[in-house]
Image (cartoon, grey):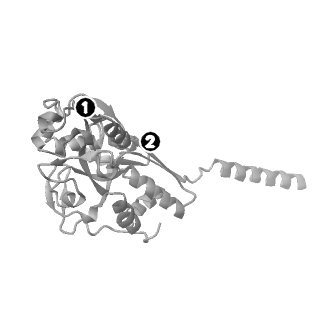
Amino acid sequence: MFNRKFKLSCLILMTVTFLTACRPLERNSLTLAGSTAFQPIVEMAAKGYNLRHPGTVINVQGGGSGTGVSQVQEGAIDIGNSDLFASEKKGINASRLRDHLIAVTGITPIVNPKAGVKNVSQRQLVAIFTGKIVNWRQLGGEDLKITVINRSIGSGTRNNFEKWGLAGHSSMVAQEQSSSGTVCKIVGATPGAISYIAFPYINKKIQPLSIDGVKPSMQNVKSNKWKIWAYEHMYTLKKNDKNTRSFLNYMMSDYVQQKIIPKLGYIPVSSMSIKRSDNGTLSSSEGSHKNIARSDTNRP
C-alpha cells in the first residue's frame, strides 16, 4: 500500500515538473529595426525604459525604413521604425499593420563647406541630383566637381527627399550609404560632396542648404514652410503583446515627447500646426495632434 502511494506521488510530481518545464517562459525582450533617422530617439528612449523595466531587453537595429516595415509585417521583429507610411512601400499590406505616430523630423540637403554654396533653388537642387549641374562653379561656388551621395534604395530619408525636395524626381545613380551617420562623415570629408540627412544629424563639419531662401529649421517645418519633412512611425502588427504595448505607451509619455524628442532635434507630433496624409494632402491640425494620450510620468 505504501509503495503504491509512493509511486503515485512520484508520478504526480514528475507530471507537474514536466508541465512546468514545458510551459513557455514570459518573453521579456523586444526587437525594433528600421529607420536610422529615427534611431537616436528609439535608442535613448530604450535606455530610459530599461531603468523602469530592468528585466526587459530592447534590441534596437537600423537597416532603413523599408527593412522596418517589411520585417514587422513578416513577424520577424516587434516594432518597425519608419520615416515612410507603410502604404508607400511596395509589397506591404498596410491594413495588417497598426501605425503609431511618434515624432516629426526635418530633412535637409547638406554639402561640404568647401563648395561655397549655402542656398539653391529647388530647380537647381533637382538639376544637381539628376546630373545636369556637375560643378559648384555653375552655382556661384568653388570650382569643385559635385559628388552626389545617396541613401540606399528603401531608405525613408531618400524617399522623402526625392518626393518633397526633388519634386518627385529620382536621384541619379551614385554612391549609396545605408546610414545617416556615414553620410555625414563622407560629406564632411569630401570637398564637393552633397547628400541629405535628417536634422538631428547636422553637425559643424557639413553645411545645410537653404532652398529658395527658406532655411531648414524646426520652426519652418512646423508650419510646412520647409516642406522636406517626415513623420517618424512605429509600426506593429494589429495583434501584439503587452511588452510591445508597454513600450509604445512609454514612447508617447510626457518624458519622451517633451524631453527626449526636442532634446535630440526632433519635433513632437503635437507641436505641428499642420498634418499630412500618406498621399500628401495637407490640413490644419486643429488640435488633432494635441490630444495624444500619455500614460507615463515625467521621469524615465
In the rendered view, does 103 fall on the left or right side of 24?
left
Residue located farthest toward the bottom when viewing the structure as drawn: 297
Disc 1 marks which amino acid?
Thr
Report the label total: 2
Residue located farthest toward the top when viewing the structure as drawn: 173
Q: Nearer the viewer, mark 1 or mark 2?
A: 1
Closer to the camera in the image, 30 or 166: 166
**Residue 250 location (% of width, % of height):** 42, 63
* Alpha carbon separation for disc pair 1 and 2: 37 Å
Task: Count residues near mark 1 (Cα–Cα under 10 Å), then give few for <14, some for 14-19, many for 20+.
Answer: many
Q: Which residue is mark 1?
A: 147
Residue 239 in view here: no
Q: Quadrant of residue 222?
A: bottom left
* In the rendered image, the vertical position of residue 142 relative to residue 53, given as above or below: above
Residue 258 in view here: yes
Q: Quadrant of residue 28?
A: bottom right
> What label does residue 233 carry, if any?
none
Q: Which residue is mark 2?
A: 76
The answer to whether the residues at label 1 and label 2 have Cβ atoms under 8 Å apart is no
Disc 2 marks which amino acid?
Ala
Task: Report helix, strand or loop for mark 1.
Answer: strand
Task: Report helix, strand or loop for mark 2.
Answer: loop
